[in-house]
Image (tube, helix red, strand yellow):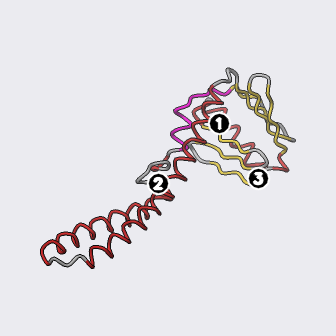
Amino acid sequence: MRIELRFNRKDFEELYFINGRGSYIKDEVIKSSFRNLMISGLVSMGLYIYAIVKSNYDLFSFSLIFLAIFLFVYLGAAKNVKKWRLQVKNYLDAQEKYSKHVLIANEYYLSIVQNDEETIEKWTNIERVKIFDSHIWILGIENFLIPAKSMSKREYDELRSLISKKFK
């Protein structure tokens, strides 16, 4: 089976950044630390108002310690999200430089040819496959993300069928 793939950056971005992934607020990695930071900020503001009214800054000082801790936790998580976003951007930038993308699959291996470079993955080296209506993840020594939009529906169904048969 030989499929000429159409590379469209937006197709990959839709898959990588699905459900808020890569967001500094909605990403699953960062969501709880952002929520804790916001709650801590609101509590600190409330205690600040209380401190002004009562002229007692003890509780407010204590809340600032928690605010600082939650801020550092959030910034650490945000740093990881930023690093991941940069990796995705660099990967997609590298993929855009190729003018030709071809997927070749037979009974022994799966191969992606980009211009003059070829990446071959034997079926036996593939550890896990995730098949969705929108894309296929192939995880092995090399990892492949193949959007359904990069080929015709018929080609996608054939590839999906071949991969399903290999990993039953």
- Kind of element beneath mark 1: helix
**Residue drawn at the location 45% of the way across and 62% of the way down:** 72
Q: CA distance from mark 2 to mark 3?
A: 31 Å
Q: On the picture, is 59 further left or further right than 161?
A: left
Q: CA distance from mark 1 to mark 2?
A: 29 Å
Q: Amino acid at mark 3?
A: Phe
Write the start and end of the magenta stretch as one range: 5-16
Residue 167 circle label: 3
Image: 66 above or below 128 = below
Image: 34 above or below 145 = below
Residue that numbered label 2 is attached to: 27
Residue that numbered label 1 is attached to: 156
Which quarter of the picture shows residue 16? top right
Magenta region includes residue 6: yes
Residue 31 image position (x, y, % from top left): 43, 60
Tell us which disc is closer to us: 1 or 2: 2
Q: Amino acid at mark 2?
A: Asp
